[in-house]
Amino acid sequence: MELSIAINNYKNPELLKLCIDSIKKNVKNVEYEIIVTDSATEEDTETMMREDYPEIKFSPHKKNVGFQVLLNRGIKESKGEYILLINGDIIVTENSVEIIRDFVKNNPSIGIAGPRLLNFNELLQYSCFRYYEPITIIYRRTPLGKLGFAKNHLDWFLMKDYDHKSSKEVDWLMGSAFMVSREAIKKVGPMDSRFFMYMEDVDWCRRFWENGYKVVYCPESKMYHYHGKASAKGGFLRSLFSNKLTWIHISSAIKYFWKYRGKPTPRHN
């Protein structure tokens, strides 16, 4: 089989249904399978998958197992030569999957490609980045980010100096949508299990670069993404003291920087 589409989902059957239906409607010119890996599976999700999509391979998990577990499980369950890894809140558009599949297929040096992600109001969602520096976390998670010098750094991190209209090699891509080749995964390996959530996409992309593969943003492929920043709700102080996801993000960042301590940061843009 040429293509596997592995969807990871967490407590959102409504968006998952929209995601699956967009695939069935818009992916036409390639043989593919769909795999859904679901975290903290609820009855309504399981019922929907069993009754509405019995042909789809469904892998439920009773507990919240984290992002990388779902993606790694999707890869393990897949059979395709190329694998589209997407969140359940992604809506694919006509030809978007074929375009990014062909982009990777025709360029064997590319290990991971990411599409242009759009908000539902058609505005660009920044999804390709330069590597984190420790100060980046501080600026993104504290009121310091509102200061002029911090804004300049965050604009650099978000690659706002790039028009996002042509394909470009980038440091890393948001894990919401990846097209990867199985051959590259065999060399690079799965996502690092030490990351429960956050930073696993940064780490994985970095490992692709370290193994001789390119990480490339492919804006010709367009997908919609319902992106809610759950770890930043309620402002900094409220988030810091009450939002578990904020602490998970900080913990993952510490693990990431510790993993790469003393190692030079590869730059590609």
Image: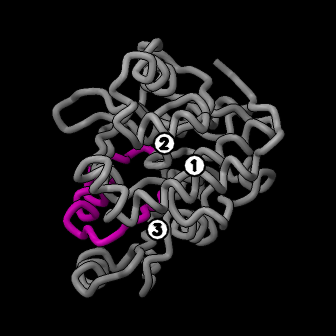
**Image mark count:** 3
Q: Quadrant of the C terminus?
A: top right
Q: Residues within 10 Å of mark 3 (few under 14, many from 20)?
A: many
Identified by mark 1, the residue type is Asp
Q: Residue at 43%, 49% (x, y): give it.
A: 176
Q: Residues within 10 Å of mark 1 (few under 14, many from 20)?
A: many
Picture coordinates of residue 10, whole percent (x, y): 35, 69
Q: Is residue 152 left or right of residue 119?
A: right
Q: Earlier in the sequence, mark 1 or mark 3?
A: 3
Picture coordinates of residue 129, whole percent (x, y): 52, 30
For residue 12: magenta?
yes
Q: Quadrant of the N terminus?
A: bottom right
Q: Residues within 10 Å of mark 2 (few under 14, many from 20)?
A: some
Q: Quadrant of residue 144?
A: top left
Tell me, for residue 174, which label it has, or none: 2
Which segment did they paint magenta?
Answer: 5-29
Tell me, for residue 35, which label it has, or none: 3
Q: Secondary structure at mark 3?
A: strand
Picture coordinates of residue 207, whole percent (x, y): 74, 45
Q: Quadrant of residue 42?
A: bottom left
Identified by mark 3, the residue type is Ile
| 101 relative to 23, above or below | above
Q: Earlier in the sequence, mark 2 or mark 1?
A: 2
**Label 1 sits on residue:** 201
Identified by mark 2, the residue type is Met
Q: Earlier in the sequence, mark 2 or mark 3?
A: 3
